[in-house]
Image (tube, rainbow, N blue to C red):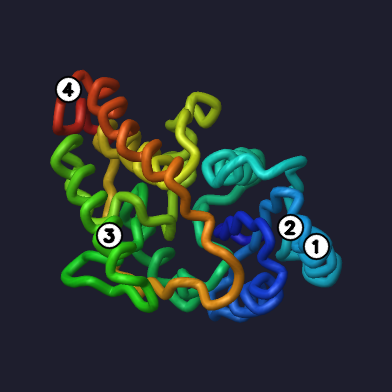
Amino acid sequence: MNKALVIVPTYNEKENLPLLARRVLSLQVSVDLLVVDDNSPDGTGKIADDLASKNPHVHVLHRAEKNGLGRAYCAGFAWALERDYEFIMEMDGDFSHNPDDIPIFLNAAQNADLVVGSRYCNGIRVINWPLGRLLLSTTAARYVQIITGMPISDPTGGYKCFRRKALQSIDLNAVGSNGYSFQIELTHKLWRQGMKIVEVPIIFTDRFLGTSKMSGKIVREALFMVWKLLIQNGFRRSPRKSAR
């Protein structure tokens, strides 16, 4: 077993998964891949099982129904923590996150508790998004910064690498969010503990195959989540304590 695990949640990603797995497993750094499939009706779960039967570094976690991104990642995190992985990564299954960046994350994680891949660190690095979607994302990032005080340029981003101890510090059963607010919530929980968070610049390319999972419900959840996090932190806009 490798020290690093890449978790990829899937729902109807049959076009992307085989190539994505090939790219991840061909990297010069050794990682394992965990596919968390939400009972995809297009057969993605079966494809994942076939990949796992041929490669011991591919694992599959089947869930009974589509229950949201946050729940999928929490299930994957729990699976990873039951094993001896030191570095646990999140990555989209549609190639919006470049697998070639994985070594950069793992290198940065040697001296951090959480590494966040940022689309907006030192400029905007987004390909194939309409202007409205880009404005929504950048406005959301600024909104999170203003309300919570968390100095992360891309708090809704989903390309991340956690150290084992960081995830162990979070009660995964108490994580209440599911969409993009899930990304905000986990980062905030670590930030307010005083854990070390670093950002690395990435290029985000919107999917060319499959269908986006964005919805109005996801946006509304994120709008209200930041206020909940502010309250949880005692209306402080800074970490409560140092984890060091």
Query: Residue 235 shows which numbered tag?
Result: 4
Question: Where's residue 199, x and y in %?
Answer: 27, 59
- Report the mark closest to the observer, 3 or 4: 4
How far is disc 2 from disc 3 in space, using C-alphas?
28 Å
- How crowded pointer 4 is (Cα within 10 Å; few <14, some 14-19, many 20+) is rated as some
Assess whether mark 3 and mark 1 are in contact (beta carbons under 8 angstroms). no
Mark 3 or mark 4, earlier in chain? 3
Assess whether mark 4 and mark 3 are in contact (beta carbons under 8 angstroms). no
**Residue occupying image coordinates x 36% and y 47%:** 113
Dot 4 amino acid type: Phe
**Horizontal arrangement in the rendering, residue 146 relative to residue 80 (left or right):** left
**Horizontal arrangement in the rendering, residue 109 relative to residue 207 (left or right):** left
Dot 3 amino acid type: Glu
- Per the image, label 1 sits on a secondary structure element best described as loop
| Residue 192 falls in image quadrant | top left
**Horizontal arrangement in the rendering, residue 146 relative to residue 127 (left or right):** left
Residue annotated with mark 1: 43
Question: Where's residue 91, x and y in %?
Answer: 51, 61
How far is disc 1 from disc 3 in space, using C-alphas?
35 Å
Dot 2 amino acid type: His
- How crowded pointer 2 is (Cα within 10 Å; few <14, some 14-19, many 20+) is rated as some
Can you say whether 132 is above or below 73 in the image? below
How far is disc 1 from disc 4 in space, using C-alphas?
46 Å
Residue annotated with mark 3: 199
**Residue occupying image coordinates x 66% and y 66%:** 13
Dot 1 amino acid type: Gly
| Residue 57 falls in image quadrant | bottom right
